[in-house]
Amino acid sequence: MSNVARTYNQNHVPRKHTPGRRRVSMYIAWSYPAEAGRNPAELDNRFSTMTEVRRVAWPAYEEPRWSDPLQFQQGIAGSLELFFWAFAPFQQFVGEIAGTPVPVFQRIDQAGFKLPLDDRVLSDVDTLLVFGLDHNVTGQEATAEEIESVRRFLNREGTCLILGPHHDVGVSDDANVRNMEYKHHGDALVPRQQRFGLYTKSLMKGLGIPVENRHGLRPLRDPATKKLAPLTIDRDLDTKGWLRGVTTFNFHMHLPHYAVTDDSGAVRVLARQPIDMSKPHPFTEAGNTEFNMFLWMPPEGNRAGDVLFADSTIFSTLFGADESLHNFWRNLATAK
């Protein structure tokens, strides 16, 4: 439990630019009411209820702070709050390095306030993380005005946009294929179809970024340490040192493959993750043994800022954090 008083439902206080310090913000591109209000009787395309989380993860969430309905919400809203719990260590770690708070914005928050990705978010940030945790069925799409605002942001020297569209499982209409995907990742909390990231997809399309989030692949783990198998890193391409001191990220049962959809060379694949091959998946049956985990688009043309791709779970501590992950966070917070 944090010993710092929590605040909610107040206006953001803009941060002043300090040379050598990066202002970092997080933007969750969901409608909280739309996600929390999904019908739990529908099997697909929703987050789990907190009751389902407790049942599947038992006894991990049986302390009163999670299980007592007088203290913690037991519906879908409860599982959404776990994201905020899990992002807090990243906020604290980076905030201490940067010397300024790391705010978390939501496209539509718990109280129904709508905050498009505009200058209210972009005017006082150097590194912006946009998490595509919106289910496609909720219809969150970037407007032309938002796309133009982000384009102006990236035209500013020294900026960095980190995009994290989450997994996209169950695309096929074939129930057998969907079931193969489900058994591959092995997470009972993920339904046979759970398609994420319409907002980030529309933003990428508007910006002309040739990347798509595909599948939900289970990464290979070391059987002894239970940590992720080491990333396959192309350090020759990592000329800015994003992965300096990094060997692995943290474990998550289903991660997206960030497919590069053209061969222009604008996107550099800096890190690939070995796949757990113990259960079949259409992607591995096509001959793949790794998936694209971390991508970089260096500045080009009028775009002065960097664009990175990294899944939102890499900034979460639900599955732990170690020195390698902290090194990655530090690299982002101190990038020149």
Image (cartoon, rainbow, N blue to C red):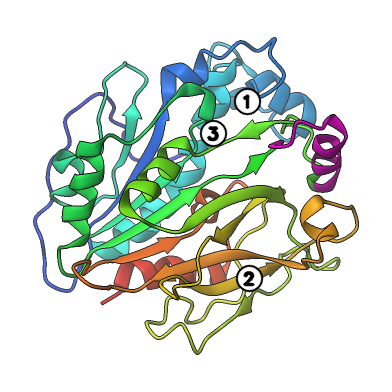
Q: Between residues 292 and 218, which one lies in front from this camera angle?
A: 292
In this view, which residue lies farthest toward the bottom?
236
Pinpoint residue 92: horizontal percent, then vertical percent: 37, 53
- In the image: residue 236, left or right of residue 145: right
The residue beneath circle 3 is 82
In this view, which residue lies farthest toward the front?
263
The residue beneath circle 1 is 45
Pinpoint residue 236: horizontal percent, then vertical percent: 50, 90
In magenta segment, residue 181: yes
Q: Earlier in the sequence, mark 1 or mark 2?
A: 1
Q: Earlier in the sequence, mark 3 or mark 1?
A: 1
Classify 193 as above or below 201.
above
In magenta segment, residue 225: no
Classify 164 as above or below 21.
above
2 vs 3, front mark: 2
- In the image: residue 224, left or right of residue 9: right
Q: Indicate which disc residue 33 carries.
A: none
The residue beneath circle 2 is 272
- At horizontal 85% and vertical 35% (from top left) the residue drawn is 179
**Quadrant into which the C terminus falls:** bottom left
Q: Main secondary structure of the magenta part?
A: helix
- At horizontal 61% and vertical 77% (from top left) the residue drawn is 247
Q: Are marks 3 and 1 in contact (CB under 8 Å)?
A: no
Q: Secondary structure at mark 2?
A: strand
